[in-house]
Image (cartoon, grey):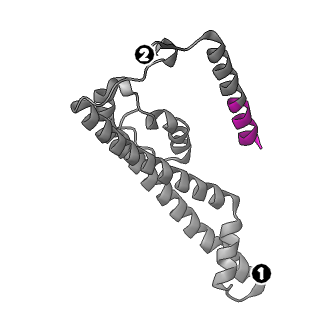
Amino acid sequence: MSFDSEPTSKKKIIALLDNAWDNISIDVLSLNEEFMRQPNLFAIFMDAEASINRLKDMYESNLNSKIREEYVDKNSKSPSEAYVEKQIKLDKEYIELSYLCAKTAGIVKSIDNKKRSLEVLSDREGKGLFSAPKDMRNYQSNNWRVDEETIKKTDLQQKKNLSKYKRIRNN
């Protein structure tokens, strides 16, 4: 993904948003690369946000004119503002564009939060307070050791939690 490919069409923006979640997560083992990608990611998604907002505004303007013209043709008088607003908000394309605007804004905010998280992680690493995640199964300290039964119970509980999460998400 590069900043050169300006996302101006709705299809390009949808494709960009579908892959956005990969760009929000942080690979703690490569903080330098994450830092170097951050400004480019922010620029790409800010551009996508501006583009989708522009598309929504243009669509709303055209739809507004169309609704007014159709109403005048049928009734020989101007429609009320409330009627026009209601018709716009009921339009399927307008609803989809509004959703894409909100989703893009959320992703931009997430990328900004990622920047703050990277700053904290970098600061902690510089102070020697940061360490990469460790596998608890290999953890041994003060003669304490995780036995196979505990591992099986933990794995079973994680599977139950995952299936519960999937059921909730699918409903």
Query: Nearer the observer, disc 2 or disc 1?
Result: 2
Above or below for 17 versus 129 = below
The quadrant the N terminus occupies is: top left
Task: Check residue 167 for magenta coloring.
Answer: yes
Q: Which residues are magenta?
A: 161-171
Say the numbered circle drawn on residue 141.
2
Position of 63 with respect to 114 (left or right) is right
- What amino acid is labelled 1 in the image? Lys
Q: Residue at x 36, y 34 (%)?
A: 2
Q: Is residue 166 magenta?
A: yes
Q: Position of residue 34 (x, y in %)?
A: 34, 31
Crowding around mark 1 (Cα neighbors within 10 Å: few <14, some 14 to 19, many 20+) is few
Q: Secondary structure at mark 1?
A: helix
Quadrant placement of the C terminus: top right
Nearest the viewer among 73 and 161 is: 161
Name the dominant secondary structure of the magenta segment.
helix
* Position of residue 33 in the picture relative to residue 68 (left or right): left
Q: Position of residue 161 (x, y in %)?
A: 69, 32
**In the figure, is residue 117 to the left or right of 98?**
left
Residue designated by label 1: 74
Q: Nearer the viewer, residue 62 or 153?
A: 153
In-front residue for pair 163/141: 141
In this view, 119 is above or below 1:
below
Q: Along the polypeptide, which appears first: circle 2 or circle 1? A: 1
Mark 2 surroundings within 10 Å by alpha-carbon count, few (fewer than 14), some (14 through 19), many (20 or more)? few
